[in-house]
Image (cartoon, rainbow, N blue to C red):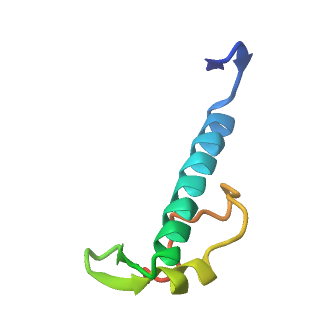
Amino acid sequence: MIVNNTELSFDELSDKILIGINKANRKLVEKTAAENGSLIIGNIDGSWKEVPAKELLEKLPKSPNPKGRFIDCPLGK
């Protein structure tokens, strides 16, 4: 696949997309934590729970490494 005149493999493109998603997710959690808010976290089985954003922020990795995905929420288990 060609993006910005450079050829990227599917894995490289996938990693770039996941990094963007992870950055956006962290930004959402940080903003919500600053407002003392909570977020709804869903489980694989379809259940959900409300979690204080500050608690979630403590469990998120610092960097948006696509291999240590934020999407796999540590609180959603």
Count of numbered tags? 0
Q: Quadrant of the C terminus?
A: bottom left
Residue 48, picture quadrant: bottom left
- Residue found at the very far front of the displayed protein: 35
Q: Position of residue 10 (x, y in %)?
A: 62, 33
Residue 22 to residue 60: above or below: above
The N terminus lies in which quarter of the figure? top right
Query: Is 49 placed left or right of 53 in the picture?
Result: left
Residue at the limit of the structure toward the left, as seen here: 46
Residue lying furthest top: 5
* Residue pictured at 63% horizontal, 49% vertical: 19
Q: Quadrant of residue 4?
A: top right
Q: Position of residue 2 (x, y in %)?
A: 64, 17
Front one among 56 and 6: 56
Residue 76 versus residue 63 in the image, above or below: below
Residue located 53% across and 54% down the image: 24
Q: Is residue 47 left or right of residue 58?
A: left
Residue 38, x across and y down, in percent: 39, 80
